[in-house]
Structures are given as C-alpha cells and as structure tokens.
C-alpha cells in the first residue's frame, strides 16, 4: 500500500463525535449545583470531551505533547532573526529539560516527545530523541518546492506513527509542538495558499524581525506562492510546495489523533498551519481539535477562523514549542474534574431553580 492510499484509508476511518454521549454530558451539566451555563467554556469542554471519547467522565491523563523539529532552506533569504543552528541547539535544550515547553509540561504532567523529522544537523542518537529524519532540512521554497510530494507524505506518515505509538502507550490527550528556525515563513505560505489571504495579512514578525525584515519576509512568501503556484492544487501539494517537515509531521499527528478518537490540542501559528492542512485533507478531523490559544502572529487568527476554531487562551504567546497547547491542559482538567466530581442538585440536597411564573400558572 502506498502512502497516498494509506492516508485515504486513515481519513475514511475518522468518525463524527458521539451525539448520545454529548447529550448525556449536557444533561449532567444541567443537573450540577450551579446555574446552567455559569461555567461557560468549561461546560463546553466537558461536552466536547464526552463526544470525542464516548465517555461521560473521560480520563485526561496520560497526555503527550509531540514536538516535531525541522530546518528550512528559506532561511537563506534572511527571514529569521536567529541562525538555523538554533534549531539543533534547542532540540538539545528540550532533551535536557531546560526549555519553556519542558517547564510547562512538568507543571501539566505531560510527556514531551521530541522528534527529529528534518533537522539539518546530525544529532546522532541522543537519549530521548526520536530520529525520524525525512531530510536534512527542506529546500528553499522561493526557488522551487520545499520538498517532494513523496517526502511530504513520508513526513505525514512519521507523525501518524509517533501519535499512534503514544496512544498505544496510553495517551488520552495529544498536543502539537514544533521547533524550526524560519518556520513561520512556510507556515505563512501554507495559510495563504489554503485561505486565499494575502501575505500582508498573514505574515508576521516571527522571532522578532524589524520593519525591513518583515517586508522582506512578506515578499519571500509572495514569491514562493508564485513560483510554486502550479503545485498548490490540493493540501498535500501545498504542504510539499511551501511547507516544512515538522508541519507535515504535525498533520500526521492530528489525523492519527482524530482517527483514534483522541482530543488534539493545537498550539500556535505553525501548528495552526498544520491543522489547516489536516482539516483540508479530512474535514471530519475538525471536531477533534481544540485551539489552545491565540498566537500573537496575526495569521493564526485567519487559520483558526478558516477552521471555525475558537481559542481558549489569549496571552500574547508566540514561542511555539507546544507551550500554548500545554497550558490548555489545565483547563481541560478543570472541565473534566467538574463533570466527574461536582454534585448534582439531588446528590447535594440543594434546591434547583424556581419555576417561572408562566410555568407555574400553566
């Protein structure tokens, strides 16, 4: 079976949420000792979890944040304030537990899975690193496609395999993370290609470009879209032409999570681009996604709106790594805890709401 056929079969396996479980969750929410709707989005999250898992009070642990790392040939165009070698250096930092994603994951009791899917440097077999390298960084997307279609499918397959491995090991929640200097440029190009939004609306400062750098980056994205315009006919074509290995890997993580009925919390701008590709490949995957936060990168809002996803948090984050997604785990835990532990009116011996005058007179 080739990768295209495998992907089609995986997509066909994705099922809609369990409506009966969602109805049961809404009924329980209506009987808990609070005014209906008074816990806002926590109530929505509880119903969402029930629908995806088919369980009224699903477990939310163990959970894994899968961090895909890859480099980008487009950094030769001066689109990042940091040099490419920072990608490999940060992978080592992740493995040592010293990055923001490590700190936040320890707080959220989440496992951090680091995958070398396309780092330009040879990192060897460092302890804790999953080496699934599709290539030593992508090609420069302003010259031609960032990767071949076969490489894009291979990278998606890597994400599927890693996600399935975590789910087989017991993961109940997945989060998407990434590392790749220059990757806001391909993410911007992907979002532009799939939404039709112009680079001026999508491309942001990334790691902190000045005005001249921002103008150059927008021009690079416009050139990439023009040079590769004949390859942008379908989501995999877009991914191959203007994407990145880590973006493609996250597409696989998302599709595998949906196929295995696991909630997938997406992070910021880069993960948003991957989620948009995944939803174009498999619209049925959209209900399995939760936007952990709204990135400070303007294009993230455009991607989320295209997927009809409403972010949980808006903290001005723009780090990536999965940080915003992991922060959302705390709110998911809160929603699940309310559903499982809060008493109903009958259980607590608390009087419910008074009937309205109209109902009393009827």
Image: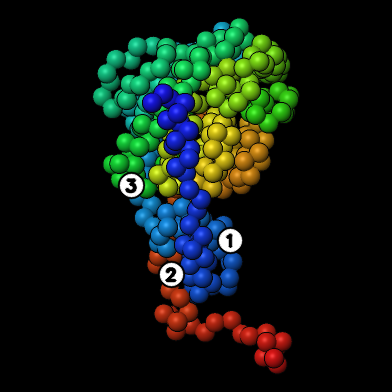
Report which residue position mark 3 lands on: 62
Question: Sequence order check: which comes first, mark 3 or mark 1?
Answer: 1
Residue appearing at x 35%, y 37% in the figure = 164
Residue appearing at x 62%, y 17% in the figure = 231
**Which corner quadrant of the image does residue 167 belong to?**
top left
Task: Tell me if 307 is positioned left or right of 198 in this view.
Answer: left
- Callout 2: 10 Å neighbours few (<14), some, many (20+)? some
Q: Which residue is at the far bottom?
A: 361
Q: Secondary structure at mark 3?
A: loop
Which callout, 2 or 3, points to the residue nearer the camera?
3
Task: Tell me if 138 is positioned left or right of 166 in this view.
Answer: right
- Callout 1: 10 Å neighbours few (<14), some, many (20+)? few
Task: Tell me if 319 is positioned left or right of 359 in this view.
Answer: left
Mark 2 vs mark 3, CA separation in Å? 22 Å
Mark 2 vs mark 1, CA separation in Å? 15 Å
Q: Across the whole image, how many numbered discs are drawn on residues?
A: 3
Q: Secondary structure at mark 2?
A: loop
- Callout 3: 10 Å neighbours few (<14), some, many (20+)? some
User: Which of the labelled discs sits on residue 342, or is there none?
Assistant: 2
Q: How is the image coloured?
A: rainbow
**Which corner quadrant of the image does residue 131 belong to?**
top left
Where's the N terminus, which quadrant? top left
Question: Sequence order check: which comes first, mark 2 or mark 1?
Answer: 1
Residue appearing at x 47%, y 26% in the figure = 4
Mark 3 vs mark 1, CA separation in Å? 25 Å
344 versus 184 height, above or below: below
Across and down, in percent, residue 64 comes to 37, 40
306 versus 158 height, above or below: below
User: Which of the labelled discs sits on residue 40, or is there none?
Assistant: 1
Asked whether 107 or 49 is in front, the reply is 49
Question: Sequence order check: which comes first, mark 2 or mark 3?
Answer: 3
């Amino acid at each position: 079976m080739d990768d295209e056929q495998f992907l089609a079969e995986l997509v066909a396996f994705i099922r809609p949420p369990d409506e009966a479980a969602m109805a049961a969750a809404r009924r329980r929410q209506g009987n808990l000792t609070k005014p209906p709707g008074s816990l806002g989005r926590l109530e929505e999250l509880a119903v969402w979890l029930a629908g995806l898992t088919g369980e009224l009070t699903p477990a939310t642990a163990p959970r894994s944040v899968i961090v895909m790392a890859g480099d980008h040939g487009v950094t030769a165009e001066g689109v990042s304030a940091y040099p490419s070698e920072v990608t490999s250096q940060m992978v080592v930092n992740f493995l040592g537990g010293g990055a923001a994603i490590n700190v936040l994951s320890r707080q959220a009791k989440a496992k951090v899975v680091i995958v070398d899917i396309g780092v330009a440097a040879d990192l060897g077999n460092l302890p804790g690193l999953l080496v699934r390298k599709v290539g030593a960084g992508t090609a420069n997307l302003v010259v031609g496609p960032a990767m071949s279609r076969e490489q894009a499918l291979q990278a998606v397959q890597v994400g599927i395999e890693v996600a399935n491995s975590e789910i087989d090991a017991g993961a109940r929640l997945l989060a998407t993370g990434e590392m790749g200097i220059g990757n806001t440029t391909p993410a911007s190009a992907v979002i532009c290609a799939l939404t039709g939004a112009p680079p001026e609306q999508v491309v942001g400062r990334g790691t902190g470009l000045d005005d001249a750098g921002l103008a150059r980056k927008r021009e690079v994205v416009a050139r990439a879209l023009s040079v590769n315009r004949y390859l942008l006919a379908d989501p995999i074509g877009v991914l191959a032409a203007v994407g990145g290995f880590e973006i493609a890997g996250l597409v696989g993580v998302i599709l595998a999570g949906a196929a295995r009925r696991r909630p997938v919390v997406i992070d910021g701008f880069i993960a948003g681009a991957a989620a948009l590709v995944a939803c174009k490949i498999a619209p049925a995957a959209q209900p399995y996604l939760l936007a952990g936060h709204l990135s400070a990168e303007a294009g993230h809002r455009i991607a989320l709106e295209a997927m009809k996803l409403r972010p949980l948090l808006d903290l001005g984050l723009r780090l990536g790594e999965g940080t915003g997604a992991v922060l959302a785990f705390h709110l998911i835990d809160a929603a699940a805890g309310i559903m499982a532990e809060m008493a109903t009116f009958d259980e607590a011996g608390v009087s419910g709401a008074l009937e309205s005058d109209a109902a009393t007179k009827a």
